[in-house]
Image (cartoon, rainbow, N blue to C red):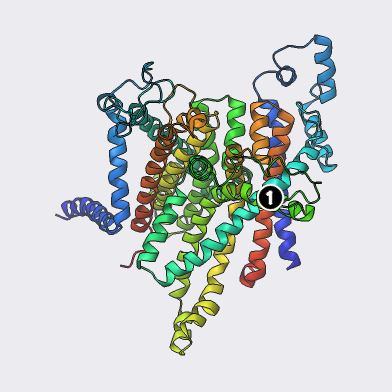
Amino acid sequence: MIRFILSKLLYLVPTFLGITLIAFSFVRILPGDPVLLMAGERGISPERHAELSAQLGFDRPLWVQYFDFLGRLFHGDLGNSLVTKKPVMAEFLTLFPATVELGLVAILIATLIGVPVGVMAAIKRGSWFDQVSMTAALVGFSMPIFWWGLLLIIFFSGILGWTPVSGRISLMYFFPDVTGFMLIDSLISGQKGAFTSAISHLILPSVVLATIPLAVIARQTRSAMLEVMGEDYVRTARAKGMSPSRVIGVHALRNAMIPVITTIGLQIGVLMAGAILTETIFSWPGIGKWMIDSISRRDYPVVQSGLLLIAGLVMLVNLLVDLTYGLINPRIRHK
Amino acid sequence: MSDTTIKLSDAAIRRQMLADFWFYFRQNRGAVVGMWVFIGLVILAVFAQVIAPHDPTQQYRDALLAPPFWQEGGSTSFLLGTDAVGRDMLSRLIYGAQYSLFIGIVVVAIALIGGIFVGLLAGFFGGWVDTVIMRVMDVILAFPSLLLALVLVAVLGPGLTNAMIAIAIVYQPHFARLTRAAVMGEKEREYVTAARVAGASTMRLMFKTILPNCLAPLIVQATLSFSSAVLDSAALGFLGMGAQPPSSEWGTMLAEAREFILRAWWVVTLPGLAILISVLAINLMGDGLRDALDPKLKRS
């Protein structure tokens, strides 16, 4: 198992270097002088330009700049935002929990609904439940989620007035940031109504973000179940006279879960892309909205480092999925 | 005699394959519905000038935010109402179909051609060529597609062309991987060895002998990418990074309509519905294509 983990880790090194190379070249391949771009429309004096160039290291050879960039990266130094002047890493760490909270709740919704629906659809293949749920899954899979979010806002916030339109919690409440997770912090604070407010703010964005993963998980679970239920060992279990619920619960479901877990893990990339849109629509203060705002504000250090951090994160989660996969399925790790 | 038999059977085989394909495709009712909707979209896009009742950029200043005709205050001259500057919604939606189909075709074409070329090289030559190419593909795949497309557009500058290039770059590794896998499976087969022994050049081996036998998974992936391209370009338009106003691209229309969500439902609902319907139709078709082309699922 240790060899398996090591080989997977080793495999990631070139990919990670590639990611740093892309993030590094990003600022350099922008048309025009990066310092002028950063200075904005007001322009800049030649002395200040030279000073800034030297400060940012743009006057040195490219490969020196790259290794310098890598070196600082390994010390956790990602530079400062041009707009807020704060370290990018600190900004990332304050905003990250909001995205994690949103993403976790979304993937929870997607899994808790998607897996049972997929299993039911497979067991009752061809029934109306199968047809309705799989049609719904295809619609969900095809959904432009930025529009879906707007529709939910029109209906639940505009017409019914049940949920707030944006943000993480009502401005009435104020409590210290303990974990960064609004659901937990609001509970700890003990303020009346704070938790309910946090939930009502979270529900629509997480449903929107869950839509596509839910559809994918339901479809994948169904087809994995169908495949497994055609296997010889399932037939044997049936022939032995085992009760149908035991055949499905013990023999079929367990084996069908392997591809499903991979699918769930792969949704992390989908979630990150979805978070950009969802956070923009609901003004959710997470890293998706941070990236969009930084792109439109031309805050290049943030875009560069955000890109790096997000890609690194996706890579890390994919590694964890791979490792879990090896853990559940010994055949893979011994290959 | 034998010459004519061979010629006949060649055409016959092709016809039989097509008939087989149609037989399996038709079994999937959703796929057929999706195909008709898609054909409808193509007709709308091609004949937009004839079908659309108004010019999509013409602003009727006396009819701002007019509701659809069945609502109070609506009129039959603007069947689906008008937007905030008095442009006819129906005409804009019809012209929007042009954008979506165009984007889908261009993105898939670039990604497909690039991916096939790169994948063929990797799969056919193996060794360090393969390693380098596939590592680069891994790096592209490590980024969430929309994020990478967004950043690429930020580098290239917002606009429809750059959005299409960005999306195509992001999709291309999928095609490269599929092609590579298929080529590696095919290149050890007897017919390839036979062709090689018969003196076929490397180019001929790659493009004429092997490639046609790798097409099925690529076609399925192409349909999936087509629908994702429509979705992603609409998302870029919505974020202000795709097609720029006043073009009637559906995502861009949605972005302009955002501030009216609680006042005029039609300016928000209709463009999104158009995106959903076209993406759904293409995905339905893709499901049918997969069933018809994937030999593993065929029960014959």
- Estimate how packed mark 1 is, as few (under 14), some (14 to 19) or many (20 or more) residues with alpha carbons within 10 Å: some
For the point 53% across and 70% down, which residue is it?
A: A256
Q: Place residue B81 in its image quadrant.
A: top left
Q: Position of residue A11 (x, y in %)?
A: 69, 53
Q: Position of residue B237 (x, y in %)?
A: 50, 31
In the image: residue A18, left or right of residue B161: right
Q: Where, quadrant-wise, is the N terminus of chain A in this rendering? A: bottom right
In the image: residue B292, left or right of residue A234: left
Q: Residue furthest bottom?
A: A240
Residue B200, can we see it? no
Q: Nearer the viewer, residue A309 or B299?
A: A309
Q: Nearer the viewer, residue B27 or A115?
A: A115
Q: Position of residue B239 (x, y in %)?
A: 55, 32
The kind of residue tagged 1 is: Val
For the point 48% across and 65% down, which residue is it?
A: A117
Q: Nearer the viewer, residue B250 or A54?
A: B250
In the image: residue A91, left or right of residue B103: right
Q: Place residue A10 in its image quadrant.
A: bottom right
The residue beneath circle 1 is A100
- Relative height, residue B163 to residue A160 (above, below): above
| SS label for mark 1 | helix
Chain on which label 1 sits: A
